[in-house]
Amino acid sequence: MGHRTALYPAHLQAGAKIVDFSGWDMPIHYGSQVEEHHAVRRRWGMFDVSHMTVVDVEGAGAREYLRYLLANDVARLGKVGKALYSGLLNEQGGVLDDLIVYRMDEAERRYRVIVNCATREKDLAWLGRVAEGYSVELRERDDLAMLAVQGPEAMAGLQQLLPAPLAEAATRLENFQGAQDGDWFAARTGYTGEAGMEILLPAAAVASLWERLLEAGCRPCGLGARDTLRLEAGMNLYGQDMDDSVTPLESNMGWSVAWEPADRAFIGRPALEAQKAAGSHARLVGVVLAAKGVLRAHQRIQLDGGLPDGELTSGSWSPTLGCAIGLARVPAGAGDSCHVEIRGKLLPARLVRPNFVRFGESQIAIPAAG
């Protein structure tokens, strides 16, 4: 038996198929992964993401600690509740994890960091090790649960269900910004490429919110739909699309590295600067299969021009687009056309920007059925 969130009984009652996910008993689907995927793209759906690790960072040294710890710069967080995405790097520039950090007060003494459950132990150890040189306290918030409510109807639906002060504040939030009301915190963030919110609240209160969402017509969704949705949105999955063997520059995360100011020291900066100057690093791209088949991680990509092979890091059938898509790491200089080896056959494919669907709309040219 693995770890279980406060919603585990509710998942069973809703007919979930439970699987092990990094030591947690989590729902993979509630009957139909495809229908759950479409519910988020067309209306709204909800995910139990309470297995994520929430760490509050507090103290006089919190700001400078995070400025050194992260590749992105928390000095960019100009208002309370604002969030940014960053890699957590080692000295070689490898990605230990990717995370979101929120500014939680005006004095810049409190921040909230949310990291992946699969990397919890190594992340907490790394955060603690780096914190030794700063006046800062780290507190894991295992008393909180977390729900992601996503889809074009999510914001309107949540207006009727969140506590009144939080619902009112949510109407003024920008993307990548959150608001707090006591122990509740809601942010305009997500992992699907749709509008919606991620809500942190006391674990004792989450079952009630889940039931009210069900009554309002919000569909429960499992990890299967979460994966196809994030892939369509071109969002990385830690352990597949990046890990500590590759850098942000090789993982379509270069935009999340804050190079300015030039005198800010952060872990991994010298290695990243050397790699950037060399300019010959691999890159993470999108792949669209122009034939019948399904893309999967670790399939070989044959490139034109005698370049070394690339490799799929993630792949799936796209329910929204009706074709196979994936993410792949390819060498510098790769063009747009390639072939993917599937069951011993080389099938034609295209390399594209890794963002396939945004707010329900295709961002790519969909290949004709072949």
Image: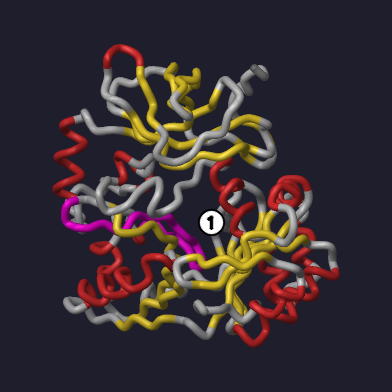
As displayed, is residue 316 above or below residue 352? below
Please report the bounds of the magenta region as a residue range: 76-92
Q: Label 1: few (<14), some or many (≥20) within 10 Å?
A: some
Name which residue type carries label 1.
Phe
Horizontal arrangement in the rendering, residue 120 relative to residue 281 (left or right): right
Instruction: Name the one closer to the observer, 208 or 167.
Output: 208
Q: Position of residue 105 (x, y in %)?
A: 45, 75
Q: From what the image shows, is residue 346 above or below residue 191?
A: above
Specify the quadrant of the image occupied by residue 311. top left
Q: In the rendered image, which residue does mark 1 sit on?
A: 176
State the residue at coordinates (52%, 85%): 143
Does the magenta run of residues contain 53?
Answer: no
Q: Is residue 180 visible?
A: no
* Position of residue 203 measured from the top left corner of the image (x, y, whole percent): 60, 83
Q: Is residue 343 above or below residue 334?
A: below
User: Quick check: can you spot residue 312?
Assistant: yes
